Amino acid sequence: MNDIVRGSEGLLNAWVQDPNVVKVIVLMVGLLLLRFVTSFLKRVATRRIDRPESVHMVKRLISMGAYILAFLLLTSVFGDKLGGLSVAFGVAGAGIAFALQEVIVSVAGWVALSLGNFYKLGDRIKLGGIKGDVIDIGVLRTTLMELGDWVQGDLYNGRIVRVANSFVFKEPVFNYSGDFPFLWDEVTVPIKYGSDWELADSLLRASCEEVVGEYSEGAKKTWKEMVKNYHIENAMIDPFITMVANDNWIEFTVRYVTDFKKRRATKDKLFRSILKKIDANAERVGLASATFHLVESPPMMNVRMFRDERESLKDKSGPL
């Protein structure tokens, strides 16, 4: 019995004194400690940050930092074991880099998105030819809730699209909501000749003030910040109306600012308001429309009878 105990103690001492075993223990303790710290930082970030998109981004950055630290811990603990494989790793790394160049560019795109100001969660963008709202920004891909396609207007069609982050280096990134969360839009109203065009102009201005007046005030404040931060002119934010007299009618164009997510709804409200005001002044103002006149077709019966008469004469007297 004593021999068995002494043999077990000898094996335990040999096992503890083995440097590889010590390294494994150090690695496991380090990983457990890193996991605890990562979870703690994520909880703190959730409590201290109010904006959901910021919380999401901070959590991703903490997770990415934890992976990097875990890799550094592994290489530092087993650095002497990995030294002989450096040449093999270099050759293999060159081949992997060539085969996974699209993945590497996507990761670089994620770094650019994290450090730059391309777009953030909740922004409405057009990336890689796809337009939609950003619902997730991953290391390799950006996830969009798609807009349009077979659906008219800026409305969701139900498809979720994942676009590679590498497109931030390949194509322009259109951001509909970045620093200026408003869009300019236009509606065209044709007024027939003979109408009181000055009254029509005042009716359109009243509709603009009624529907989009609230957007103009908020847009002015945001545009002032844009002028401070960028080399850009102080554009006109208030709604304005232009008029063109063409061959068919007097064409009024109404230009206004609206929220980037309410473009279609705002246009609907504006048209309803304009039509109500024009109907209330129908004696003085009227909408124009294109009129097409179809020319009557020739009487087919007479043509057929004339052809029959010519054929009968040819039979009786020969060629005419």
Image (cartoon, grey):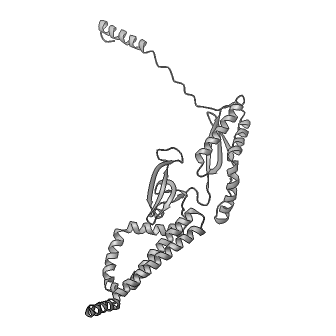
260, above or below 8, in the image: above
Residue drawn where x is 70% and y is 48% of the image = 213
Residue drawn where x is 67% and y is 62% of the image = 225
Left or right placement of residue 36 versus residue 87 in this view: right
48, above or below 124, in the image: below
Q: Residue furthest top?
A: 316
Q: Position of residue 238 (x, y in %)?
A: 70, 50
Q: Position of residue 53 (x, y in %)?
A: 55, 63
The quarter of the picture where residue 305 lies is top left
Q: Position of residue 67 (x, y in %)?
A: 44, 74
Left or right placement of residue 120 versus residue 276 in this view: left
Left or right placement of residue 48 versus residue 298 in this view: right
- Quarter of the picture containing the C terminus is top left
Q: Position of residue 21 (x, y in %)?
A: 34, 86
Residue drawn where x is 62% and y is 58% of the image = 180
178 and 294: which is toward the camera: 178
25, above or below 268, in the image: below
262, above or below 22, in the image: above
Give the number of callouts: 0
57 and 203: which is toward the camera: 57
- Quarter of the picture containing the N terminus is bottom left
Q: Residue furthest front?
A: 1
Residue 78 shows in this picture: no
18 and 75: which is toward the camera: 18
Residue drawn where x is 43% and y is 66% of the image = 106
Residue 92 shows in this picture: yes
